[in-house]
Image (cartoon, rainbow, N blue to C red):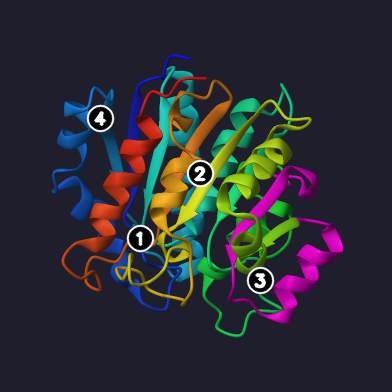
Amino acid sequence: MSMRPIEIIGFASGLGARNPGCAAGPDSMAQSSLVPSLQQQACDIAWRTTLRPAAATSPLAGIQALCTSLAQEVGATINDGKLPLVIGGDHSCAIGTWSGAAQRFREQGPLGLIWIDAHMDSHTPETTPSGSIHGMPLAALLGYGAPELVNIGSFSPKILPAHLCLIGIRSFESGEADLLRRLGVRIFFMDEIKQRGIAAVMAEALAIAQHGTVGFGISIDLDAFNPKESPGVGTPVRHGLHHLALDKALAGIMHHPRLVALELAEYNPRRDRNQLSLKLTANLLSAFCRRVKN
């Protein structure tokens, strides 16, 4: 399998989070050795652009506008024959990323999505205890929540429940859990991952995301990982994934012909220690770009 050139789209916004420090994440990664290091490993990768919020009357209006721009940028990147890699910013970026990808492939069929996160991010304005929009993107993609977010791209839903799975969940509230349970979404909680291993879980997740779809995407919140490995996040949760295991489980995924986009969110450089989260991201992307034998 040959890998398409990768183009990075930064989403420099923390409008959706209680701690807005993740807005600095894309610039911190752009100024690091991340891209040059990957290029030295023969990874065809370049930084396409970084999107930033304009003045807005509210976080909701700002996120709506920015996610609309991101959706357009993701669609244009795919049309150019490139593989979009979106780097947030808070996880509200997912509304733009997967709205753009779903719009691009809408006439061909549905998309699958693998959501790797400590949280479900499936609240609506009626169920959220915090009001933070970065806890709502998955619900919006499924067609639930604020119309301003649900209807980006003028269609909904972007992802169907049967084509979605969540991995690494260990912190959630009843309102969002009830929604996903009612929809029949497959959730791999940390207890199951510990019992079965991430390799078996990821194999099942890839099967779900590809069954009846034209392609699939992967969205990774860096708080999915053990905070000792990834302290540079806004909402750390104990007992997370170990990145070396995920490196191995998803090695070479960038070469997969049905992968339509990849997303990494919630890097907060202000909370990072010794650049551990930044190094973890570099290791992840290096593994994802690695050529592996079938």
> Which residue: 29% across, 70% down?
21
Number of marks drawn: 4
Q: Is residue 267 visible?
A: yes
Q: CA–CA distance between discs 4 and 2?
A: 18 Å
Tag 3's secondary structure? loop
Residue under label 3, please give it: 123
Looking at marks 2 and 1 on the same chain, the residue that comes earlier in the sequence is marked by: 1
Residue under label 4, please give it: 46
Towards the viewer: 130 or 60: 130
Towards the viewer: 146 or 250: 250
Name the spot of residue 198 as percent of width and height, x first. Answer: 57, 52
Looking at marks 4 and 2 on the same chain, the residue that comes earlier in the sequence is marked by: 4
132 vs 68: above or below: below
* Image mark for residue 97: 2
Q: Is residue 51 visible?
A: no
Residue under label 1, please give it: 13
Name the residue type under label 2: Thr
Q: CA–CA distance between discs 1 and 3?
A: 20 Å
Looking at marks 2 and 3 on the same chain, the residue that comes earlier in the sequence is marked by: 2
Write the start and end of the magenta stretch as one range. Answer: 157-185
Q: Residues within 10 Å of mark 2 (few under 14, many from 20)?
A: many
Name the spot of residue 27 as percent of width and height, x first. Answer: 21, 53
* Foreground: disc 4 or disc 2: 4
Q: Residues within 10 Å of mark 3 (few under 14, many from 20)?
A: many
Name the residue type under label 3: His
Magenta region includes residue 57: no
Name the residue type under label 4: Ala
